Image: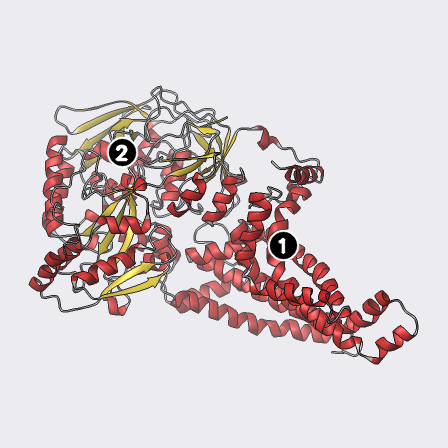
Amino acid sequence: MSTMRRALTAFAVAAAVPFLATEASAQKTLRFVPHSDLKILDPIWTTAYIVRNHGYMVYDTLFGMDDKGEIQPQMVDTYKLSDDKLTWTMTLRDGLMWHDGQPVTTADIVPSIKRWASKDSMGQKLMSFVASVEAKDDKTFEIKLKEPTGLVLLALGKPSSNVPFMMPKRIAETDPNRQIEEFIGSGPFIFKRDEWVPGSKLVYTKFEGYKPRSEPPSGTTGGKVVKIDRVEWLPIRDHQQAVNALLAGEVDYIEAPPHDLHPLIKKSKDIYMFNWNPLGSQYTFRFNVLHKPFDNPKIRQAVLYAFNQEDFLKATVGSEEYYKVCKGLFICGTPFGTEVGFEDMFESNFKKARELLAEAKYDGTPVVLMHSTDNQSLTNLAPVAKSLMERAGFKVDMQSMDWQTVVARRVKKDPPEAGGWHAFLTSWVAGDLLNPVMAGFVNAACDKAMFGWPCDETIEKLRDDFAKEVDPAKQKAIVKALQRRVAEYPTHAHLGQFYNHGAIRNNLKGIVPAPAPVLWNITIE
Amino acid sequence: MGGYILRRVLSTLPVLAIVAVLVFLMLRLTPSDPAAIIAGDYASPEQIEGIRERLGLNEPILKQFIIWISGVLQGDFGESFFYKKQVAELIGERLEPTLSLSVITILLVVLVAVPLGIIAAHNHGTWIDRFVMGFSVLGFSIPVFVVGYILIYVFAVTLDWLPVQGYQRIREGVGGWLLRLILPAMTLSLVFIAFIARMTRTSVLEVLNEDYIRTARAKGQTEIKVLIRHALANAAVPILTIIGLTVAILIGGVVVTESVYTLPGLGLLTVDAVLARDYPTIQAVILLFSFAYVLINLLVDVAYTFLDPRIRY
């Protein structure tokens, strides 16, 4: 701190109202800049990642995903599947407690599972196999299945939106279509609602009653040991300002500074970059199959032949250090990551793309491509898509708009000339893409699918087969078959994986790599 | 005067009514969907539809308007779609940073710009005059966010004298409160200092050639007294008009400044609400801004009568 800053600070302290104590400064406080402001506090009600991250602070989960992508117990102590594979019996760990001091019991768990499952697409799929979820006693509950499925642990341990966070019975019984109004969890941090300054600051304090697991932390599982007293989330909209604040020591950890600011951050000897999400994220080009020309799978295939992932990744991420070319739908390096089906695609084979367009009798209908201009990580994708598609012989009408307009417009089924659309680009966190049931864009259930509304019985049957299969080896075979089918009937084009490193001051240690930014285990020196 | 003020206050009602209708319609006619935003990027169509239903966005626009305006007339601006708080409460929480920034900026502007303008006028044609005018052109040529970044780089990042961003409530200490407002106020005030200094110079210059100034000087009054009591007093009406306009324009300026400096005021609330399509919040904030604008103009008009006894309403 400079002499002038010290002098000014001394002035500030001297002029401070004397009765105000500076208790907070005596504590170990982590000042964290999240990727956006938190407005909604119910992680079951919305799929927004920022709310999911808030959920990991306040709530705990029955299962989690470790750093190898395996599902591990978290609140659950022991669990077993009956020999007929129709009954899961799960027992809670000893000593679990809500932030209001009440013990966690299965009376809380059952409605929590039900509320989550009514909102989450994977939860809904799981419930289609479930006959009942019942408490046997305070610590043991059973999930009875109508038929065997391999989804139970995958769904209860899913690391990303919507995460099945557990809540007290009175809160979990809130109508799933209404937001909860009380924020009591059993997670490692307590949300201090009275200190919340909307738009500016969220405060969490260590939950002294939290009983961590004995294993070391791994992904969203293991010992969630909190080694600081207090966390302040300080949403700073302007990325450059967030970096300035980090350089000046006003904040300790920026969740995901944009890649173009990395060189500036790396110049500082007081800061290091850390890839807290080793699985990364994936860029995606989504088709709307309701309208010409993308109602024809061959024309969608032409797009996959025209694209190459490297161009997209270079335009948005830049340095090879932060991206990986991967033709697999379900994230290379994870249990279901495979490139089968896409071997000859994503090579910018314009000759093949043009042949497919000719075969499909593409009539030159312009493709309405929505281009979001204010979402920094997506802005450069649409121009690359336009250029590659035009080289393959497409006509492209790229329409620029802010991201929220894209969000509003993409749910419209109207023809593109009447306010609808043909395609847009977005990104997914890898934690949402780890298998065919989890990955929303693979859903090809027509009207029930996500915007874009792909409609294919074969894909849906393979997704069902995957859900019913309990043998991981057979699940892998189903994934390969499904991927081959998606190559024939493209639901979307996946454009490579990228990694958002956090920027952290050197005095912070112990960041746990996970699919979401988790703040336990961190020490401040 | 009382009758005039009453008439002016009543005349604000149709203005506010027109603003209310326009804002409401514009928001509904833009291609946006708060339900899709609230639901999150990965929500299913059913989730989005459920939220739309809950927020009443599926109702006919006229019905939505009647519900909203009935609430407003009873002092109920509705509940924020996102924060699940009453909008009035949300605005109440955000008033302090905006008022603090505005008051400090106005003080800074008046205390710097008016003397600068008088000095330039008094030294008309000299290097001092040219310097002030040069600064003035520079001041309103540079966008606010550029000024902000330069000040931050110099005073916060390089010299480490002042905080980069953030706000401290006044009840948590006047010193810290002031410290965090210095850079935002400097950023926001530059353009207005430039503008008002220029206007003050012109106004004072006009009256400096009047007979009563010559008379005052002939009576042996000091130059300071001549400038303040005679020149400035007679040039005050146009200067006050500009200061009044400045206060009104400041309302727009705080949007950018609060965003850059992460001040949790009405400006940041406006940006967040617009980006999130938080209709109740946007409508209330714009109504509030409109009301403030009308009120400031009224106060300026009333102030004329104190500065110039010839003006009567």
Which residue appears at 26% of the width and 64% of the height?
A: A420
Asked which secondary structure carries label 2, the reply is helix
Residue found 89% across the figure and 77% down from its top? B215
Instruction: Please tell me in which quadrant of the rendered image residue A474 appears.
Output: top left
Circle 2 residue: A156
Position of residue A301 measured from the top left corner of the image (x, y, whole percent)? 13, 55
In this rendering, does residue B282 appear at all?
A: yes
Q: Nearer the viewer, residue A440 or B280?
A: A440
Which of the 4 image quarters holds residue A334?
Answer: top left
Q: Is A89 positioned to the left or the right of B85 in the image?
A: left
Residue at the spot x=45%, y=31% of the render?
Answer: A189
> Measuring 13% from the left and 46% from the top, which residue is drawn there?
A342
Q: Which residue is mark 1?
A: B186
What is the number of callouts on the image?
2
Which part of the image, by quadrant, shows the N terminus of chain A? top right
x, y (%) of residue A483? 13, 44
Q: Position of residue A368 (x, y in %)?
A: 25, 64
Secondary element type, mark 1 = helix
Amino acid type shown at disc 1:
Met
Please identify, in this view, whether the residue under mark 2 or under mark 1 is nearer the observer: 1
Residue B201 appears left or right of A415: right
Give, as a three-letter code, the residue at label 2.
Leu
| x and y percentages locating residue B203 in the rendered image | 73, 73
Local crowd size for mark 2, using a 10 Å CA cut-off: few (<14), some (14–19), many (≥20)? many
Q: On screen, A284 above or below A52?
A: below
- Identify which residue, B227 or B137, lies in the foreground: B137
